Image (cartoon, helix red, strand yellow):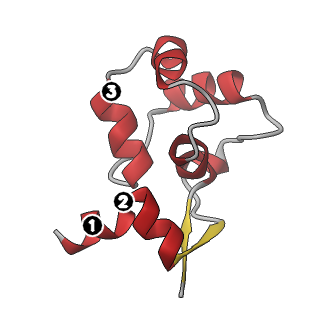
Amino acid sequence: DLMKITPLQYLLLNKNKPQKAILQAVGVKRIRLWQWKRGLGFPKRLNVEKLIAFYGPEQLDYNGCFVASVEITAEQARLYGLLNDVAN
């Protein structure tokens, strides 16, 4: 089975940038990143602009923060801890 997540979730879940660097660039608390990573909320417009500047437009655009377009397997979802959130 496949599920879709946003490109932002994919970037955050794959930890290709240090969390501390993201927190400093965007100016949010860890709980906010955790919520975005889990798909439990979305960044505000100003934070979207900061995220795009941080990751670069080739990795993330405006829709990438909101539209679930990256397919992952159920196994990947389990590894990322996403299925636990759904079950609870």
Q: Which dot marks residue 84?
A: 1
Q: Which dot marks residue 57?
A: none
Element marked by disc 2? loop
Q: Looking at the picture, tell me which residue is in the foreground, 33 or 20.
A: 20
First-in-chain label (1 vs 3): 3
Mark pair 2, 3: CA separation:
17 Å
Vertical placement of 14 versus 67: above or below? above
* Residue for point 32% across, 53% down: 40
Residues under numbered marks 1 and 2 in contact, where contact means CB atoms less than 8 Å apart: yes
From the image, state whether disc 2 or disc 3 is nearer to you. Answer: 2
Element marked by disc 3? helix
Mark pair 1, 3: CA separation:
19 Å
Whether residue 49 sits left or right of residue 76 in the image: it is right
Residue picked out by circle 2: 81
Q: Identify residue type, mark 2.
A: Gly
Give the quarter of the figure containing the C terminus: bottom left
Whether residue 6 sits left or right of residue 54 in the image: it is left
From the image, state whether disc 1 or disc 3 is nearer to you. Answer: 1
* Residue for point 61% across, 28% down: 17
Whether residue 10 sits left or right of residue 28 in the image: it is right
Vertical placement of 37 versus 54: above or below? below
Q: Residues within 10 Å of mark 3 (few under 14, many from 20)?
A: few
Element marked by disc 1? helix
Q: Position of residue 80 (x, y in %)?
A: 44, 57
Q: Which dot marks residue 30?
A: 3
Q: Position of residue 56 (x, y in %)?
A: 76, 29
* Residue for point 35% across, 40% down: 34
Residues under numbered marks 2 and 3 in contact, where contact means CB atoms less than 8 Å apart: no
Q: Residues within 10 Å of mark 2 (few under 14, many from 20)?
A: few
Q: Position of residue 22 (x, y in %)?
A: 52, 22
